[in-house]
């Protein structure tokens, strides 16, 4: 059900006047999604935090937790069954599960607000 304001206040993720709290790791990953809205991911199992590699190196465990946090806040989508087309997952060969992550409409709105309004500490 839509209240007619922002389109989100009647959703489970909130909307009008809502404050969005992000950890430093979540904010860093959200800024990465602002540059590239679709990213690869992998993991030992879909039940664990996803792994995102940068320059062939796995980011810190906190970043995997940050990805779960962003997904839980509705800002990104984790798709274990949709690997990126034409992406070589060679760097992810140690991980049996390959998928993709995508910025959601809510995530895009958050990125746009960050660019316009900035953040409060």
Image (spheres, helix red, strand yellow):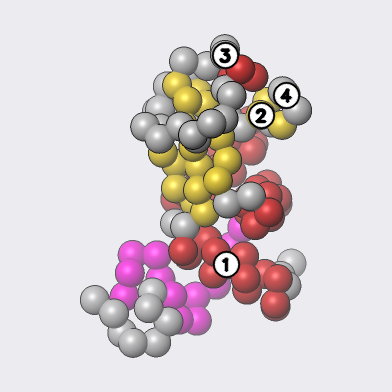
Closer to the chain start, of discs 1 and 2, is: 2
Helix or strand or loop: what does disc 1 sit on? Answer: helix
Q: Main secondary structure of the magenta part?
A: loop
- Other-residue count near label 2 (Cα within 10 Å), few / some / many at <14 / 14–19 / ≥20: some
Question: CA–CA distance between discs 1 and 4?
Answer: 28 Å
Most foreground residue, 4 or 69: 4
Q: Are marks 1 and 4 in contact (CB under 8 Å)?
A: no
Helix or strand or loop: what does disc 3 sit on? Answer: loop
Closer to the chain start, of discs 2 and 3, is: 2
Closer to the chain start, of discs 1 and 4, is: 4
> In the picture, which quadrant includes the C terminus?
bottom right
Residue 40 falls in which quadrant of the image?
top right
Q: Which residue is mark 4?
A: 57
Q: Which residue is mark 2?
A: 53
Residue 105, image x, y percentages: 46, 64
Residue 17, image x, y percentages: 50, 81
Question: CA–CA distance between discs 3 and 4?
Answer: 12 Å
């Amino acid at each position: 059900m839509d209240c007619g304001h922002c389109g989100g206040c009647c959703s489970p993720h909130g909307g009008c006047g809502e404050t969005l709290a992000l950890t430093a790791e979540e904010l860093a990953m959200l800024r990465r999604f602002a540059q590239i809205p679709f990213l690869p991911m992998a993991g030992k199992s879909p039940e664990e935090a996803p792994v995102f590699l940068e320059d062939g190196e796995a980011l810190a465990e906190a970043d995997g937790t940050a990805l779960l946090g962003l997904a839980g806040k509705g800002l990104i989508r984790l798709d274990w069954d949709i690997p990126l087309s034409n992406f070589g997952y060679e760097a992810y060969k140690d991980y049996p599960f390959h998928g993709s992550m995508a910025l959601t409409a809510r995530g895009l709105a958050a990125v746009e607000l960050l660019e316009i309004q900035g953040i409060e500490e």
